[in-house]
Amino acid sequence: MKATVQQATVQHGATRVNEAANGHIEIGTTPRALRSRHLLGIDGLEADEITLILDTAEAMKEIGTRAIKKVPTLRGRTVVNLFFEPSTRTRTSFEIAEKRLSADTLSIATAMSSVTKGESLLDTIRNIEAMSPDMIVMRHSSSGAPHLLARMCQSTIVNAGDGTHEHPTQALLDAFTIRSHKGRLDGLTVAIIGDLMHSRVLRSNILLLRKVGADVRVCGPATLLPAGLDRFGVAVTTSIDEALEGADVVMMLRIQQERMDGHFFPSVREYFSLFGLTRERLKRAKPDVIVMHPGPMNRGVEIDSEVADGPGSVILEQVSNGVAVRMAVLYLLAGRETAAERPERSESE
Amino acid sequence: MPQVMDADRMSRALTRIAHEILERNRGLDEIALVGIRTRGVPLARRLARSLREINGDDVPTGALDITLYRDDLMRNPVGPQPVVRRTEIPFSIDDRKILLVDDVLYTGRTIRAALDALIDFGRPRAIQLVVMVDRGHRELPIKADFVGKNLPTSLKQSVQVRLQEIDGADEVTIEGEA
């Protein structure tokens, strides 16, 4: 895996020279690029790559305001959305992003696929791969599944959420939303509150926010604090009031009951009384605080309806921004390589 | 690198083009300027200023990024994607005469991309092309309506238009041997 990334960087350096030599259409600025041809997590991204994605998303957002919301950029490219876990928002968002870039897309939900007939993950992947798609957008309940895929197959892999590990496009759209409200990311105080144990959104967000220089506080019940959180360079607390004090951004996380195989708190009512975000509590944050939630929301569990629909809430904006950010990611990754032009497996491993 | 136009000549060329635009279109009704990023944008703004000085009317002006419409995108097996910047056309182009503005007209491929992009915004009554320099060597059937300077070049040469707003000075230079 390491070797692949290094080689890709070397090749990328070489093309830059070529492009300068035969540049047909003048580009204007130095082209920048993502270093990997997959997006597996925020973990593998540098701060300048994050900025590149957010800047590109800025341009993509305008396309959604046109009468014809479509550009021909990914014409003839095939993108497969492979969702082994239920998802409405993320899958729809990826599909819209792909269609706006003119890619040919198909979505496979496991409920309707041969996975229910007992096929293994690797066999499913190999069969899809045999039809040579250019990109696979994948969600899976096992952490690391897209990483396995990236090693096994030739297509570009985009992680749309793997187990409790990462959800990189969510963190990117969150950062995009914050930046569009605050004008910057560095130096902001971001409080992330809720089910810290099961949240891939948390992990991706912490990684991203730390890379771009934001201060992160995380807060949740002691039973839902994963070990070693402090190693991520974040402040950990079990008091929501402490977490909210002077915050620029509040991110609420969903209580993921479907991932809980035990009792982590006595009752939903008790959870809401101790960790639910209410208008009264939110007064501790900065007056211009924005409230975010990756969805789906459990109203009355982690967030009060009054706050979710209140003035500082940017929750629906996050959803609209998701399309622009995913368009940016697909565009930037698509330049890396195409299935047809790729040499026979020589570069991997 | 030999200079082919200085700031003075560029400014006079733009003023002349502004007059020609008025003459050909009999006034500024339903006209709008769209500059192609990067250097078409300041040129379009300058033209808007000249047109206002001559005629007193404000002409709506927009910026078009053609990156996503380029025909050479994704042609390199492994390569960085060109940077996409924002398109800003804050007016309806339906039934308007659009003056598309760019710095250098060369192969015509940028203009092809720009025409495709513009059509996605609506159905203009007409599109006219304004360029500061036409250096020849067209690869597509495209022709400019208003030209600052016709500059015969060889394929080996490169033409640079520099603008105060972006490069700190106004000049057109030609590099490489003929």
Image: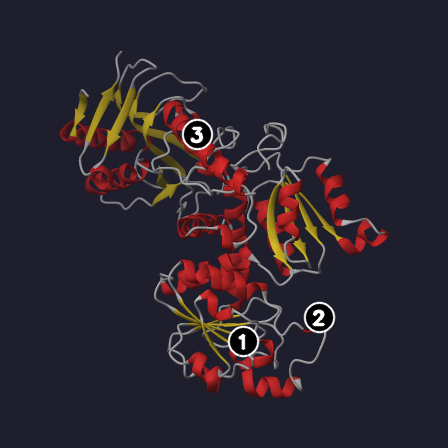
Q: Quadrant of residue B28?
A: top left
Query: Which disc number belongs to residue A228?
Result: none
Residue extending farthest to the left is B8
The numbered mark 2 sits on a residue in which chain? A
Please name which of the two marks, 1 or 2, marks the residue nearer to the observer.
2
Q: Chain ID for label 1?
A: A
Who comes first in sequence, dot 3 or dot 2?
Answer: 3
Residue that carries the numbered disc 1 in the rendered image: A308
- Does residue A273 appear in the picture of this structure? yes
Whether residue B75 sits left or right of residue B7 in the image: it is right
| In the image, residue A116 above or below residue B108 | below
In the rendered structure, which disc, 3 or 1, sits on the residue that comes first in sequence?
Answer: 3
Q: State which mark lies toward you, 3 or 1.
A: 3
What amino acid is labelled 1 in the image?
Ala
Disc 1 element: helix
Of marks 1 and 2, which one's residue comes earlier in the chain?
2
Mark 3 and mark 2 on one chain = yes
Number of other residues with Cα within 10 Å of mark 2, as a class: few under 14, some 14 to 19, many 20 or more: few
Chain where mark 3 sits: A
Using the image, tell me which numbered label, if any, was put on residue A258. Answer: 2
Question: Would you place residue B126 above or below residue B174 in this image?
Answer: below
Q: How far is the residue under mark 1 from the one under mark 2?
A: 22 Å
Distance between the Cα atoms at labels 3 and 2? 47 Å
Q: Could you say which quadrant of the image residue A215 lies in?
A: bottom left
Residue kind at label 3, given as amino acid type:
Thr
Q: In the rendered image, which residue does mark 3 sit on?
A: A15
| A248 to the left or right of A141 | left
The percent position of residue B169, horizontal first and vertical second, equals: 17, 35
Amino acid bearing label 2: Glu
Asked whether B147 or A63 is in front, the reply is A63
